[in-house]
Amino acid sequence: MIQQAARDFAQSELLPGVIERDNKQQFPAEQIRKMGELGFMGMMVDPKYGGGGMDNLSYVIAMEELSKVDASASVAMSVNNSLVCWGIEKYGSEEQRQKYLVPLATGQKLGAFCLSEPEAGSDATSQRTTAEFKGDHYVLNGNKNWITNGNTADYYVVMAQTDKELGHRGINAFIVEKSWDGFVVGKKEDKMGIRGSDTHSIMFQDVKVPLENRIGEDGFGFKFAMKVLSGGRIGIAAQALGIAAGAFELATKYSKERKAFGKTISQHQAIAFKLADMATQVEAARLLTYKAARLKDAGKPFDMESAMAKLHASETAMKVTTEAVQVHGGYGFVKEYHVERLMRDAKITQIYEGTSEIQRLVISRAVLDA
Ligand SMILES: Cc1cc2nc3c(=O)[nH]c(=O)nc-3n(C[C@H](O)[C@H](O)[C@H](O)COP(=O)(O)OP(=O)(O)OC[C@H]3O[C@@H](n4cnc5c(N)ncnc54)[C@H](O)[C@@H]3O)c2cc1C
């Protein structure tokens, strides 16, 4: 039912206008509002906080379907669900859940996750944003880069350094409201892919954050970010899977319609074998993603499996979308046929929430420690 609901929504609400939004770098605001009404923005949150009470498997199934059509909409959903809502529900206080999680899970408000900085990407320990403790509040100063939902979010989960001497153990995580004094939205990035997604830098200029908005104990921020990102990777794996599966479906359909040398191109073995490889890679990505989701649902360790799922699904997305363009020939190179956009969108899945190199680092450490 979830798969069908997501598929119907993608076809009826996301597909019309997706090319135009990509051209204009236009955020799918209306579509995200409707996704909130349908329960896609807080799928796994406990119903007592306004969520759907579903499992991770349901979430990745929905993510796959929506990403087949519009990866810009699905990344907004992924950040809200797996980074912001999950982080607050799991590690936040009851007050934080009531005040922030309820509007985020019901889609009335949108969340953003602010870890990356100009000098701190893969090496997230090098936080230069500071959170100076002042007794009953903190004062935030610094810059964040590449923030998804940067200008459209209402609530931002922000990591910042409180005690430099303690290194990553001196980092804290805070819930920050966009409306607060000193919160400045910086430039919008002009991107290669997921162009409908709203990516901005953010500046904090003496932003006063109440003590009660810190998530967890003093110094918990880095651990919080790593835990949340490990779960988030399942969502990005599902996004990559959807991009790959969407391109595969389009290529298969086209191969049965396009004729060359007196037969459909699907009847040429070179094309049929390409489709066979694409189908196999997509299915492997799906199974790895489902496995990571199931482990998380069962409350078992999933750090290695979520890294494997993201690594494999994102590499698959890149390969399969490139082949989908090839199957379409010249038509694949123009916007009307969607596959060139899917190819551009695929690239980001190898970069955000940990690059492919960082996933290999996580996996190699796990296999070597075993
Ligand atoms: C469109 C977009 C949206 C994003 N959204 C968000 C967001 O919402 N919130 C957020 O906090 N961040 C976000 N990011 C940031 C993203 O997570 C980082 O770009 C990513 O983690 C990589 O960091 P970097 O760009 O600084 O690259 P670097 O860390 O400088 O990496 C450059 C290259 O070096 C490699 N490398 C680095 N360290 C190692 C190592 N130890 N071993 C092997 N190779 C290594 C990397 O894999 C990469 O190939 C987003 C980025 C983009 C482009």
Image (spheres, rainbow, N blue to C red):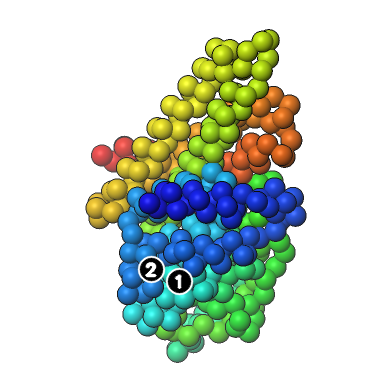
**Which residue is located at x 45 percent, y 33 percent?**
282
Alpha-carbon neighbours of circle 2 within 10 Å: few (<14), some, or many (≥20)?
A: many
Which one is nearer the viewer's eye here, 332 or 141? 332
Residue 347 rendering spot, x and y as whole percentages = 60, 41
**Which residue is located at x 54 percent, y 39 percent?**
246
Name the residue carrying label 1: 106
Amino acid at pointer 1:
Thr
**Which residue is located at x 50 percent, y 42 percent?**
242
Residue 88 rendering spot, x and y as whole percentages = 40, 70
Which one is nearer the viewer's eye here, 171 or 349? 349
**Which residue is located at x 44 percent, y 64 percent?**
39
Q: Is residue 178 left or right of residue 282?
A: right
Give the quadrant of residue 337: top right
Residue 267 rendering spot, x and y as whole percentages = 56, 14
Find out if the beta carbon at label 2 lies less than 8 Å from the nearest ligand 1 atom: no
Q: Is residue 290 left or right of residue 66?
A: left
Residue 140 rendering spot, x and y as whole percentages = 56, 77
Q: For numbered disc 2, what is the local secondary structure?
A: loop
> Is residue 60 at least partly visible in the picture?
no
User: In this rendering, is residue 106 above or below 66?
Assistant: below
User: In this rendering, is residue 367 above or below 97?
Assistant: above
> Is residue 102 at least partly visible in the picture?
yes
Alpha-carbon neighbours of circle 1 within 10 Å: few (<14), some, or many (≥20)?
A: many
Look at the numbered discs 1 and 2 and tell me whether their residues touch, using CB distance below 8 Å. Answer: yes
Give the quadrant of residue 21: bottom right
- Outermost residue on the bottom side: it is 136
Q: For numbered disc 1, what is the local secondary structure?
A: loop
Name the residue carrying label 2: 51
Give the quadrant of residue 207: bottom right
N-terminal label among 1 and 2: 2
Amino acid at pointer 2:
Gly
